[in-house]
Image (tube, grey):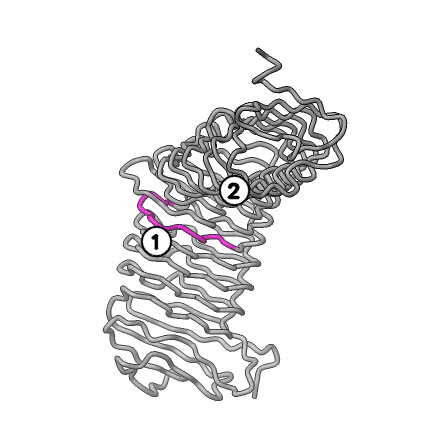
Amino acid sequence: MIPNDGIEFIDVEGYNGAFEAKYIINDVSKKIQIINIPQDKINMSVFVNNTKIKDLKENETEIFFENIYNNKIKIKYSGKLTNLFSLFSNLIHLEVINLNEMDTSEVRTMEKMFYGCTSLKSVTMNYIKTPNLENSNSMFENCEKLEKIYMKNFDTKNIVSSKSMFEDCKQLNKIYIDNYFDLTKCEDASYMFNGCNSLKEIYLKNNGEKSVPINIKSIFNENYALERIYLNKFDKKIIIDISSAFNNCRNLKSIDLSKFDTSQVSSIHSIFSNCYNLVSIDITQLNLSNTNSFSYAFRNCTSLQSLDLSNFNTNKAESMTGTFYGCSSLISADLSNYIIDITSLDDLFCGCTSLQNVTISVKRVQIVTGMFKECYSLKYLDLSNFNSKEIILKTGFFPEEITNATVVYNSSIFENIKNFISNEGIIFIDVNIDLY
């Protein structure tokens, strides 16, 4: 008979410790899978109501129980666990788990430990020790109902990879941890918090010594509720990929990246895309000398009014499609410090409806489709160092609605400018003639 509350308690006891889990029973088959057998060579036995029913074989990978309602189930093991890979993965009935007394002192991997536990709401692991933990990839990935994780003393200082650790934990709103997540030895933290729609604050640190390069691609992607990111001692952390890192952080108002070492970054694609409430960002200290993709970097940063681009190094740029697309509050943009040599600048400032002043230097470009589309407030455009000789696509280069702007150009490198800008009322100043 199924209990009225639909809940089954499973106790698992082990060498030097135990853990307790609560499951919800709702499947038609009336079967429940409570654990995936660890890969460690340890002795494990299954008990129902304190009666031993079987010893687990080394080659067994899972256990199914049928008609166990109101029975107490234990798994006893002897030996040290070192590998918890996929231990509870895809246990869709698991709702709450407490690991406080489980011995994890020798564990090196917790990869996919709770992967796909779609009913899991709470995890408590305040007192477990993880001094040797190196791999936490996808540990809680796709735990879509997980709300809280209690990991007060969780040791992250030796983690090498935490890729997708909390990915798509859509309801996760609090991680209780005493210290910052230590990423000093971490090489891959990409997608670590990707899709954590409900988290409001995150604490990360680097101890500043013997730091290794790290990939943080999409680390905070689609963190809709995120308001604060605390980065401690990241001045010596070398970033190798930061693309989409803050994409869709809709509530983030500011972020300090001034101490990031981005000298090896090849792409900042969509780094701040759809950060609607971002009002300030200091990128003057970012080293972008090896960056080739700038596409959609600030797309739809609708609250951003100013941006210091004096150190926006585009010398190796290969893509700048939509870099400032939809920055509807941006008033001015100066891209004259570095010469752009690129195939396409399509949609570069498209939708920048408040943009009034633009200065840009271009050595070579072929596609400028929609470059200033919907820039209805444009009053001053300096193209005096803009070479148009290789342009083959120019549809929507300049908004037809503008009739009172000043355009500065050099006829020796920008030929037939009125084929690009034919609006009546435009004041053209040719530096090749008018200023000499």
Position of residue 308 measured from the top left corner of the image (x, y, whole percent) = 54, 26
Position of residue 7 measured from the top left corner of the image (x, y, whole percent) = 55, 76
Question: Identity of the amino acid at label 2?
Answer: Ser
Instruction: Tell whether label 2 touches label 1 (CB within 8 Å).
Output: no
- The residue beneath circle 1 is 161
> Relative to 148, does residue 210 appear above or below in the rendering?
above
Q: Is residue 227 visible?
A: no
The C terminus is located in which quarter? top right
Q: Earlier in the sequence, mark 1 or mark 2?
A: 1
Q: Which residues are magenta?
A: 182-194
Q: In the image, is 408 to the left or to the right of 68?
A: right
Q: Residues within 10 Å of mark 1 (few under 14, many from 20)?
A: many
Q: Residues within 10 Å of mark 2 (few under 14, many from 20)?
A: many
Q: Nearer the viewer, residue 155 or 28?
A: 28
Quadrant assignment, res 393:
top right
> Relative to 296, does residue 129 appear above or below in the rendering?
below
Q: Secondary structure at mark 1?
A: loop
- The residue beneath circle 2 is 344
Position of residue 310 measured from the top left corner of the image (x, y, whole percent) = 50, 25
Q: Nearer the viewer, residue 310 or 343?
A: 343
- What's the distance in space between the residues labelled 1 and 2, CA to CA? 36 Å
Q: What residue appears at the point 46 percent right and 46 percent down from the top-left corner?
A: 243
Q: What residue appears at the point 63 percent right and 26 percent down from the top-left corner?
A: 381
Q: In the image, is 375 to the left or to the right of 288?
A: right
Q: Secondary structure at mark 2?
A: loop
Q: Nearer the viewer, residue 358 or 412?
A: 412
Question: Identity of the amino acid at label 1?
Answer: Ser
Q: What residue appears at the point 44 percent right and 79 percent down from the top-left corner?
A: 33
